Amino acid sequence: MELMPWLSAGIITVTLVGVAVGRYPWLHMNRATIALVGATLLMALGVIPLEAAYRAVDWNTILLLFAMMILNVNLRLAGFFHLVTAGVVRFARTPRRLLALVIVVSGVLSAIFLNDTIALAMTPMVLEMVLTLRRNPLPYLVALVTAANVGSLATITGNPQNMLVGISSGISFVRFFLELAPVAFAGLAVVWLVIALVYRTEFTAVSFAETAPVRGQEDPILLRKSILATGLMLVALIAGAPIPLAAMVAAALLLITRRQKPERVFREVDWSLLVFFAALFVVTGAIETSGWGAKLFAWLRPWADGGPAKLTAVSVVLSNLVSNVPAVMLFRPVVPTLAGPHTAWLTLAMATTLAGNLTLLGSVANLIVAELAKNRGVHLSFVEYLKAGTPIAVLTLLSGVFWLSI
């Protein structure tokens, strides 16, 4: 029995488990460094040659992710997210209306600007708002992050796994939106209903006696420029322009500036996420070159070829075992061989996105919200999250399966 296939399988398994867990005991390593070390070991052992590793990286996805980060950084520096939150404060007069506004704003913005970005930008402002109003912050935090995950389903730019699906499948921006936006919109209604029921004592028929100031400031010139660049990107995407190119042109427009030093923008870019993606592409490429890809293909194909319900079930399990982005990467070589690849791609995007709401560990956005809340003395525990998060995940997944089946 040859040693190398089993050694490669061990490295791949340890890497994917580390990615899923997020760290290993006694080691100061995050998902990016775990994926990078795993990819390097696989290259060093010859499991995947260096040239093959270069080819394994999907540069379209990397470019799209990088461009969206630049766009989001400029919007944050311009005070866009503060402006939106201040608008929510002005219109919210009751707890139920505040909940609805948080859900709608989080869901809609996540569809355009990435769910992780919305979680990062809006959590501190939502916390400040609800604590000033003397409300229980937990239902609003759960609403913010579950709506961000659900809303991100609507577009290719909504989350990293959608980017992977969009680039790999060749589905246009508009077609993707028309196919999956109904699931996302229905899901936002589910989020409001579940949270209003689970935390019914919080949402009694009362009115706020005061408004909550949200600290922050805007840069009007950068704000106008960022909104213009975003609008031009959306017009280009709707017109059918290549998705990475449309995003990169918008990012390039924002880098032409006399006001912002480029170092400030680049400091805000999540380089760790880009490293994570590039390394993970190499790891999944090694699955193919090592021969384990054929075995994985044989195991996944019967599940993937069984229609939306069956594919959703295995996608949810795989997403919670190895995380949603690796799950999509593992399915990439399988989906094009199926009888209905178009529906399979959409099902994969739907299932891996909505599965992120199952537990507090289900998505990076969930962890961002929990960590930022902890810094403000608000504890969103694993069990507390399950009260609303799990029902939301189950109901939205069922609605997604129903929609894609008909």
Image (spheres, grey):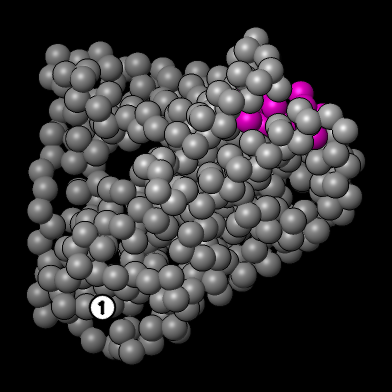
* Quadrant of the rendering where the N terminus is positioned: top right
Query: Residue 169 or 264: which is nearer the viewer?
Result: 264
- Tell me where residue 247 appears, x and y as whole percent: 45, 25
- Tell me where residue 160 appears, x and y as whole percent: 52, 39
Residue 223 against residue 23 in the figure, above or below: above
Q: Which residue is mark 1?
A: 136
Residue 3 against residue 381 in the figure, above or below: above
- Tell me where residue 81 appears, x and y as whole percent: 25, 46
Left or right for 210, reference 122: left
Query: Residue 259 or 232: which is nearer the viewer?
Result: 259
The main secondary structure of the magenta stretch is helix
Residue 291 is at least partly visible in this image: yes
- Tell me where residue 24 appears, x and y as whole percent: 47, 48
Residue 269 against residue 245 in the figure, above or below: below
Query: Residue 284 or 338: which is nearer the viewer?
Result: 284
Within 10 Å of disc 1 (Cα), the crowding (few <14, some 14-19, many 20+) is: some
Amino acid bearing label 1: Asn
Left or right for 149, reference 330: left
**Disc count in the image?**
1
Confirm whether the magenta stretch covers residue 138: no
Q: Residue at x 68, y 53 (%)?
A: 318
Give the extent of the magenta segment.
Answer: 282-293
